[in-house]
Image (cartoon, grey):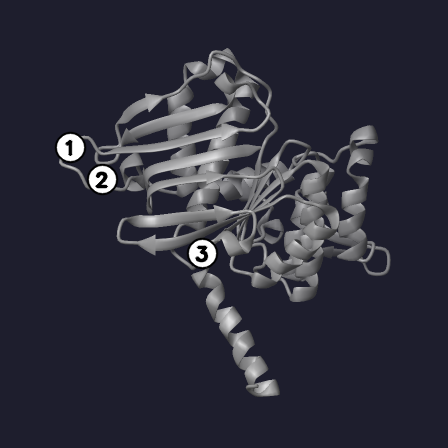
Amino acid sequence: MLKNLKLTNFTAFSEAELNFSKGINFIIGRNGVGKSHLLKAGYVICQEKYQMGLEGESYTAKGWGWIFSKLMNTFKVMGFSHLGRKQNTDSNIYETKLEGTLFDFPDDFAKSEFSFDSETGSPISHYQPSQTVRVEASIYIPPKEILTIYPGLAQAIEDRELSFDHTYYDLAKALGRKPLKGKRLEEISDILLTIEKDVFNGGKFIEKNSQFYFEKESIGELEAPLVAEGLCKVGMLAHLLRNGSLVKGSTLFWDEPESNLNPQLLKLVAKAMTSLADYGIQVVVATHSLFLMRELDILSRQKDTDLRFFGLSETSDGVKVSQGDSIEDIDDIQSLEAELEQSDRYLSLEYGDE
């Protein structure tokens, strides 16, 4: 779980530091201010720790190479220099730095830090802890669902036949895992029931012969491309739980979950997110949806789920981040102003000015 993320001269950010909760975290801002960049940066931090814990000492020899490859593929750029933001300084060194820490791990291991020259892309430093600890894998769900294009997707990206960033590749690999059985499946049965009963009315998505189907007693099996995209997005979440890709201690990074979801489905997604957080899965969401935030606020008050809000706004010195435990703590919510203003106009027309 991601505790802290700090960026220095990284993409749109001159200086930014975000302190996360273990529950549900909202990153809010209009298009183009770097919401997805923050999600991807946090994802890379978490996945580096997962890889380090997975490989142990053998990771040390290739650590910088792994970071280089992961950043390039996750952000889909050709070099480190494309990720850097130049400093307003006379110095010949333009340093771009990405730092992070995790919850619930020894201080030495929890810390991540690497930096490079923003102009040349040359490495400057990479922190290597003296110990390795097992970390649960994180999951990144991009705006577009992939169940409908799943067959062969990972291999096609690997072979450079399709130009997708590696959040899609990683997700396709995670979806390909076999379903859990026994006690591990029983542990997540309540969350799955919330999704499959409420959203799918007893149906579920299954993977068979490298193809996803929606299975329901009343209709049999439907290929994923015949199912509404919004349902497929929720189906991805359910399948990742069912096959053990999302477990206690994982972080779910979800970019615009509201995309192609109607308000009724969005209410159920909010319910599922709250269940995930209560179970012990951290959720980090980039969103424009005031409806989703309000629904999660309502649910969190009923279940005492921790919420954290981050507002992104453009300045002459890069994108700035305000943060707090409620939406009122955010300095700038430009992305929500149009929705709020429309509500005011509608009420004014409906009831008249008093």
How many labels sit on residues? 3
Is residue 93 shown to the viewer in this render? yes
Is residue 158 shown to the viewer in this render? no
Quadrant for the C terminus in the image = bottom right
Q: Is residue 194 left or right of residue 158?
A: right
Which residue corresponds to the image point at 66% horizontal and 42% vertical from the top-left?
A: 210
Q: Report helix, strand or loop for mark 2.
A: loop
Residue topped by disc 1 = 91
Q: Report helix, strand or loop for mark 1.
A: loop
Residue topped by disc 3 = 29
Whole-percent x, y for residue 156 in the image: 50, 42
Q: Is residue 2 above or below residue 190?
A: above
Which residue corresponds to the image point at 43% horizontal and 55% vertical from the top-left?
A: 331
Residue topped by disc 2 = 87
Quadrant for the N terminus in the image = top right
Q: Quadrant of residue 267?
A: bottom right
Q: Is residue 339 above or below residue 112?
A: below
